[in-house]
Amino acid sequence: MGTSVTVRCRRPYDLDAELFTDTADQFRNALFLPPPAFDELDLSNYEYVRLRDPERTARGIRVVAVRVESCPALIEPDHYVGALRTNLYNKVSSIARTEDGGLVVDVCVDETVTQFSGTAGRTYDDEIDYRVCHLSECRMEQLGIATGSTVELFNPATGGRIDVVVGAPHDDPALVRVDVRSRQAIDIEPGDGVGVRNTGITADANQSLSRWIQKFFIDSREMPFNVRLGPDQDEYRNVVRMTEDMMAFLGIDPGDNVVLKWRGKRTKAQCLTTELDDDSPPNTIKMPATERDRIDISVHDAVSVERDMVYVFQEQIARSVFGIIGVVVGALQVIVVTDVSGIVEQHGLAFTAAGFVLAVAGVSVLVTYLLLTPERQKCVSHE
């Protein structure tokens, strides 16, 4: 283990609440430390560290370290004082020594994470590439990754993170080619600094049979969104907000449900419209704390959003149920006027029954597919 420092963990409201007004809600999985602690650990802002009990051999808990520029309360004679949000404080309490005034842990750089800083650039086909980055071969070797691996990109100014897949390598060691939507999702432009980390994460596997069926009937478009604070009135309402243009891009209407995904966690919320500030990227989503807590995501991170295909299917079937029933009844009438006895005599009862069931099922699937054509068109009319 490398250099470590001793930190007494407190909660922001136990210290100077005013100091954490702009940052405490940003990182729900972060440790706030003063600059001297960063200097001693040779640590950069928003870098990953491990919190652990020095008397145990466990790897501890991985968190993001956030620099707090001026807070005398974060420095004491024998150790530093770190601020943790309550949910993380409670988690850390399971691995930390408890002393009067807080939890005491050792903090060290997470040596399982490799990273470097580069300059963001465009991909070769910036409008088509999706959640992909291209690095030089030497940088891929430095990070211990290969084409097809998943890495974390982060904005050095805000700490915003997004997971992307590594594409074919290029020749410039300082350049990180990133697709336009991923750049917008962490609010960076070509020429800005961008960090690349290998955190050991893998791409979410989401190719189940049920999802394939949903895509076949409904279709959807998934996109990363930059997470910003939601208005106070949205707390506990299970809603999120984005612009009408972005809703049209996803193929949804105001009031429809969307699926929000972040590192294996997912939740559903109703989507409402909003206006954005001039400095916000177009793919911005406003999420209240209650919704961010559901998937453990922070402000400025990139959440994946797509329309709730199950919700759309149920809504459309509910509206068209009588039409579908009519088609099925018509198919049954055709069966009634057919010479069933002759078919049974020739092929047997089981074969005939199975054939009629398959015919009715096929007609039902075809009718359902046709009825849902307008919904599928929503995902191809805004390319």
Image (cartoon, helix red, strand yellow):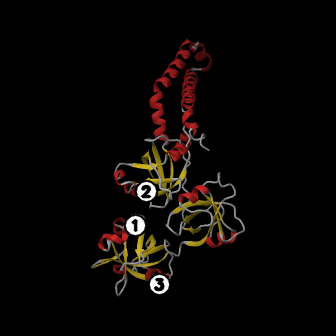
Discs 1/2, front? 1
Within 10 angstroms of label 2, few (less than 14), some, or many (20 or more) residues? some
**Label 2 belongs to which residue?**
295
Which comes sooner in the sequence, label 3 or label 1? 1
Vertical placement of residue 22 versus 227, above or below: below
Mark 1–mark 2 Cα distance, whole angstroms, equals 21 Å
- In the image as oriented, which residue stretches furthest toward the right? 171
Vertical placement of residue 127 versus 103, above or below: above
Camera sees residue 157: yes
Mark 3–mark 1 Cα distance, whole angstroms, equals 25 Å
Discs 3/1, front? 1
The amino acid pointed to by label 1 is Asp
Q: Secondary structure at mark 2?
A: helix
- In the image as oriented, which residue stretches furthest toward the bottom? 77
Q: Report the residue at 47% width, 74% height from top.
A: 49
Q: Report the residue at 57% width, 27% height from top.
A: 358
Which comes sooner in the sequence, label 2 or label 3? 3
Which comes sooner in the sequence, label 1 or label 2? 1
Rendered-image quadrant of the C terminus:
top right
Picture coordinates of residue 338, whole percent (x, y)? 58, 13
Numbered badge on residue 122: none
Camera sees residue 84: no
Q: Report the residue at 53% width, 53% height from top.
A: 282
For residue 140, what is the image quadrant? bottom right
